[in-house]
Amino acid sequence: MIRPRLVVLSRAGRATLSEGDWASLEQRARVQVVRCDEAPTRAEALALLADADLLGATNRCLPHLDAALLDQLPRLRGIVLYATGYGHLDVDLLRSRGVGLSVLPGYATVAVAEHALAMLLSHGTRLHLANDRSRGLAPPDVSLRGVELAGRTLGIIGVGRIGGRLAQIAAGIGMEVLGTDVSAVATAEAVAHGVRMTSLSALLAGSDAVAVCASSVHGGAAILAGRELAQLRPGSFLVNVARADLVDTAAAVTAVRARHLRGYAVDDVVLDPAVDGDLLAEGRVLQTGHTAWWRDEVLARGSTMWADRMAAAAVDSPVDAVTWPEAIGPRRTVRHEWVGQASA
């Protein structure tokens, strides 16, 4: 049997995996490892993938996979993405071109849930602002007065792996937890862990803090826009550890400026300091630049999982496949459906 050709794109190149993982992978595929600091251009992608059967890539190094590029890569039959979420990819397009997609659900669950709690604690304690003021980076007249989270209600949008873990640790510090999710499986699991499930409107109206932990859908609209943010309790907190576009940034800024929201924390960079620098200086908007997953344990776990999934794809036995072409052979996949506001 001819081994498939696998191209691996990663910022760390060969250092991404252990030599043992590479040795195991190279028994199953003809591997080319490419170190790249950013996604290759269309021309570069065409040159790299012209005769590739499989692509392994981190999000940072993933080419823009539109119809025009895929149509010029007729051999490409599978992508193994070093990520949990894939809302930035058009799965219907991949499916129509016979290109599979395998992902890494669960590899950063604990880290991202803990990051969400840290964001809540930062807004509650004003810890980030106290640090800034001690270094002369925040105006001296900005208040450091915070609130206790114990006894308050946390609403979680998307109570899957991350949202479910956040619910457990939030309950551990004395918070009541509400949840909403379109997934029946996530809902059942959340109820079993003591989360009171309700509608989105009821959650927004009944929570002192809201955490967005849902998955994004390719081309989908924001879950929280102006109308939804207006339903939040005055003085509440909003935390977003999912995709930034699940919250309408302009609407969130308006709500913060109007003091309807006490604070907004997002694991991304969404504000221009030249325009909204005062909100950053005052600590009312906290941006963490997509670092929630950046932990020692996550990197070790993710590398192993990525190697395993690339090896499985190479022998046509994909794991955690969102979609995979039947034409390659009998499907032996563990499927994870992500629909609407289903959680990560």
Image: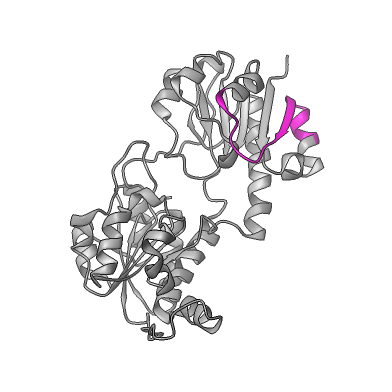
In the orientation shown, which residue stands out farthest toward the front?
274
**Residue 5 on image: x %, y %:** 69, 21
Relative to residue 74, is residue 112 depicted above or below?
below
Q: Kindly identify the residue that appears in the image at 46 percent across and 18 percent down.
A: 68
Please state if 149 lies on the left or on the right of 291 as rendered. Answer: left
Q: Looking at the image, which is closer to me, 165 or 82?
A: 82
State whether residue 5 is above or below residue 223.
above
Classify residue 305 as left or right of residue 13.
left
Residue 289 percent coordinates (x, y): 51, 57
Does residue 98 show up? no
Query: What colour-coding does the image apply?
Result: one colour
Q: Nearer the viewer, residue 271 or 319?
A: 271
At x 39%, y 86%, the residue is: 141
In the figure, is residue 229 to the left or right of 68? left
The answer to whether residue 128 is above or below residue 220 is: below
Q: Residue 342: x, y in percent?
A: 35, 47
Membership of 29 in magenta stretch: yes
The residue stretch that appears in magenta: 23-42
Q: Is residue 243 visible?
A: yes
